[in-house]
Amino acid sequence: MVTKKILLPVLIFSCFSALAQISFGDSKKINDNWKFTLQDAPNAQSVTLNDSDWQSVNVPHDWSVKGQLSPTLASCTGYLPGGIGWYRKSLNIPQSKSGEKVYLYFEGVYNRSEVFINGHSLGKRPNGYISFAYDATPFIKYGADNIIAVRVDHSQSADSRWYTGSGIYRNVWLVYSNPVHIAQWGVYAYPEVNKNKGILNLEVTVENGAAAKANLTVLNELITKDGKTVVKSSNKVEVAANQNSTIATKLNVSNPALWDLEHPNLYQLKTTVLKDGKVIDHSSMQTGFRNFTFDANNGFALNGKWMKMKGVCLHHDAGVLGSAVPRDVWRTRLKTLKEIGVNAIRTSHNPQAPDFYELCDELGLLVLNEAYDEWEFPKRKWLTGWNVGTPGFEGSFDIFADWAEQDLSDIVRRDRNHLSVFAWSIGNEVDYPNDPYSHPVLDKGKEGFGQAAYGGYKKEAPDAMRLGAIAKRLVAAVKKYDKSRPTTAGLAGVAMSNETEYPGSLDIAGYNYTESKYQSDHEKYPNRVIYGSENVHDMEPWLAVKNNKHIFGQFLWTGIDYLGESGSWPSRGFYSGLVDLAGIIKPRGYFRQSLWSEKPMIYAGTYPANDKKELSKDAWSIWNYNPGQMIRVVAYTNAAKARLELDGKVVGEAKPYDEKTGIIYWDIPFASGKLEAVGLNNENQIVSKYAIISSQQPSALVSNDTNITIDKEKGVAKIVVQVVDEKGLPVMLSDNEVVCTVTGPGVLLGLEAGNNSDMTDYTDNVQRVFHGHIVAYVQATDVAQPITVKFTSQWLKPVEVKVTVK
């Protein structure tokens, strides 16, 4: 059998500032003190417009999540509104900056934005997930106030299959630079790693915006985390007026510390540009050494070690916060996923904010970076419930012809220097049978299709043979700017796509819900590298990865519950995640932990027993039932066996781990007390325990988050509050209404309990707990003083949490 190997030694950067994102100039966030109106205000770009009656907001800002939930709105976007909105900001540019260039850098605006400065249009960017910068210099008034205006058109509110949010939902930066500077995203590095030797290949592009040629020196310096310079280089370059020039150099490193999932070792790369001996520009970013191997027979290896990717798909919202998700919230969520055993993320189905990739670099998580969910034609967008009723067909397809290659190129150039990114996905389920493409093979049955095919072959539908040509264009756009990683896509209609050139144009092929083709396609296409790009949470898809050496991993749908793609009203979103909207691990998260984590663990959940002998991976830790009622107790564990005890007495004999189901269970009559699942090794030694104790009536609110410290510059505290009884035991069945009050230099961003069917107002400070808990997100407001957060509920003892701000 032929073996296909893709050897990709990679060194990439983890960026911690706009300096690293843009890679030039001096930058600062300009997120505060914007004015906003949710209407298409006439002449809103005009410097003379009076915006005093507009709403004062800070960005990142998502207006949709603050809107009114309504059953008359589209289910695909979470029953939340879109619309057209305008933002304005007054920005003073000092006279001392005269002679410097001025750029505005937006990490993301959803969507169809147009940016103005002092009434002049700087440009339009329809794709809401793309970062972009504009040179505002020709229209800047130095020593005076300048008016930035941004029009955002999300009037096609049902333009996505999931919740997108609306507005300037990511950071905005002001950048000053010399006319001669490093180009935007102009530093690129890729390594060669061979045993104990690392070679960092560097390309630095310098842009000369001046009227005369520039003779420059470009310095590159590699520094360890403790500040020691490992190696440096110096190169001379001449850049003609109004031209760009790229210099290439190599940095040799002996015995580099490799980046891996357990030890994400990082270096710092400093790039400096000098003219006549003076520094005129600089860039600084984190970097690290590692290599990939993709093999059609053996799967995937990181730094020469074969491993399985235990991945999840993630959308970009965070429940009540919508799409404007602070960095601290993402850090907490990603750490929770890693605790479960997740080691890879698929950005479904669009690039995330820069903070996301930086955190994955820091934490040691692999990232499959995805660009598109639809290409040249629209997909179905469900309006009255997931896969229910008549769909809509709004979308981003209308911008594909004009923007596809540029958007994809910008994604690659922005993110190619992230250590976490291991592949570029050019599309998700664009080959979904009859949504929109069709092929005669659809008349041959359902084998090879993991999802509905919407009937047989439809001659009037777009020809699936088009997929190959489009894929080749997109792959070429990727390879132009990054040859160090493979291209991929999530294939929904594998049997149909196999009739086209689409899979063959990819370096590695993702199969969505098509485990049935893993073996047959491996035999039919022996050079194809295959993995599960989207999978359900059942045991069988995981065993298809675990037991097949050539399948290098899977990506569960989904890692975290998300807004949109909702069921029929009432439903805020899709709730198949390992973690709920509040960032709390769900029972299926513990089930997955039992499969993926190396640390000893056990979890116990319960539900009424029935004659069907169902084994659930969604059993909550509740031990409150009617006396004598037959209850099924399930244990999720990575122990060799487990037994069940009630108040210290064995009520369920030790049973071995079930390799087929991953679940050990007992049916016992309910009696109140302390129910404990005990994990044992093969020598009957205790390796893990998990207890559930019968609770009484709710008595108080408590929080274990009593020692929280956040950064004064918009740091966010996540505070978890639990309802307990008189003995301090969690009351999982409570649904008490909680009021949150913030005192001091902080603001409540929102309350989130994770209840998918709670369609009440999420913009205020009142919310009901779900499974006995609720989460509050409190953000600092740039003042280093303590914040007090108080939680109250009728009939319950309140709790106060002190937040230290530094």
Image (cartoon, helix red, strand yellow):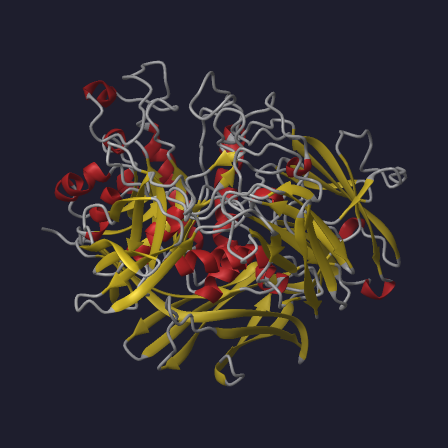
Between 771 and 114, the one nearer to me in the picture: 771
Residue 637, placed above or below residue 430: below
Q: Residue 451, percent across and down?
A: 31, 29
Between 639 and 443, the one nearer to me in the picture: 639
Between 255 and 733, the one nearer to me in the picture: 733
The residue shown at (83%, 38%) is: 54
The residue shown at (41%, 59%) is: 338
Q: Is residue 761 left or right of residue 675?
A: right
Looking at the rendering, which quadrant does residue 450 occupy? top left
Q: Is residue 358 visible?
A: yes
Q: Is residue 501 left or right of residue 364?
A: left
Q: Is residue 788 left or right of residue 652?
A: right
Q: Quadrant of the C terminus?
A: bottom right
Looking at the rendering, which quadrant does residue 197 occupy? bottom left
Q: Residue 736, percent across and down?
A: 61, 42
Residue 56, placed above or below residue 717: above
Q: Residue furthest bottom?
A: 228
Q: Residue 714, percent across and down?
A: 69, 59
Between 570 and 563, the one nearer to me in the picture: 570
The residue shown at (27%, 77%) is: 195
Q: Residue 768, percent across and down?
A: 61, 41
